[in-house]
Amino acid sequence: MKVKLICVGKTVSKFLIEGENDYLKRLNHYNSVEKIEIPEIKNAKNLSKDQIKKTEGELIIKHIQPSDFVVLLDENGTSFSSVKFAHYMQKKFNSGGKNLIFIVGGAYGFSDEVYALANDKISLSKMTFSHQMVRLFFLEQIYRAFTILKGEPYHHQ
């Protein structure tokens, strides 16, 4: 099963880009992990929040197949410890399927159409982080999950 992280917008901070690339490189040792960046909406200032979410949603949906398991990174989702998240990932891999898709939405969240396609929602924290930082944090958690599952010494209890 391939892991994909779909993100709205590009990461622009150099240190975040370097961190993302570092974890993507590390993850290739364990599994195929791909980051897909959806372009930010042009002329968004002239659109309502709902119009922005709808347009972003249409672009996100183009990257989702019917056999994919879709997980939204959403403030109202389930919170996990790193160990429990590793077990969550293992269950998804054991269940088969084509892709395990994680989605980081834009500043206004997800459209109703994206919510309708979601199989699950995960919350990283009750705190709010920039969408660019979430990508790095989440890639690190995916890496941590693989090291936990392999019994490697990266994670300390």
Image (cartoon, helix red, strand yellow):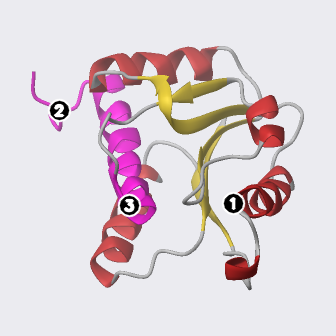
Residue 16: image x %, image y %?
33, 72
**Which one is closest to the eye, mark 1 or mark 3?**
1
Measured as percent of width and height from the top left, residue 70 is found at 70, 34
Which of pointers 1 and 3 lies earlier in the amino acid sequence?
Answer: 1
Instruction: Please report contact status of discs 2 and 1: CB closer than 8 Å, yes or no.
Output: no
Residue on which disc 3 sits = 130
Q: Amino acid at mark 2?
A: His
Residue highlighted by disc 1: 49
From the top left corner, tell me how far across and down residue 120 is, in percent: 63, 24
Which quarter of the picture shows residue 67?
top right
- Is 154 on the left-hand or right-hand side of 42? left
Residue at (33, 27) in percent of width and height: 150
Determine contact: label 2, label 3, CB under 8 Å.
no
Badge 3 marks a residue whose secondary structure is: loop
**Kind of residue indicated by mark 3:** Ser
On screen, 96 above or below 143?
above
Give residue 131's position: percent from left, percent from top.
45, 60
Q: Which secondary structure, mark 2?
A: loop
Label 2, label 1: how many angstroms apart (C-alpha)?
A: 39 Å
Q: Amino acid at mark 1?
A: Lys
Question: How crowded is the residue under tag 2: few (<14 C-alpha within 10 Å), some, or many (20+)?
Answer: few
**Circle 1: element type:** helix
The number of discs equals 3
Vertical placement of residue 34 versus 127, above or below: below
For mark 3, does the 10 Å Cα neighbourhood hold few (<14), some (14 to 19), or many (20 or more) residues? few
Pointer 2: what residue? 155
Whether residue 42 is in magenta: the answer is no
Magenta range: 129-157
- Mark 1–mark 3 Cα distance, whole angstroms, equals 17 Å
| First reached walking from the N terminus: tag 2 or tag 1 | 1
Which comes sooner in the sequence, label 2 or label 3? 3
- Magenta part mainly helix, strand or loop? helix
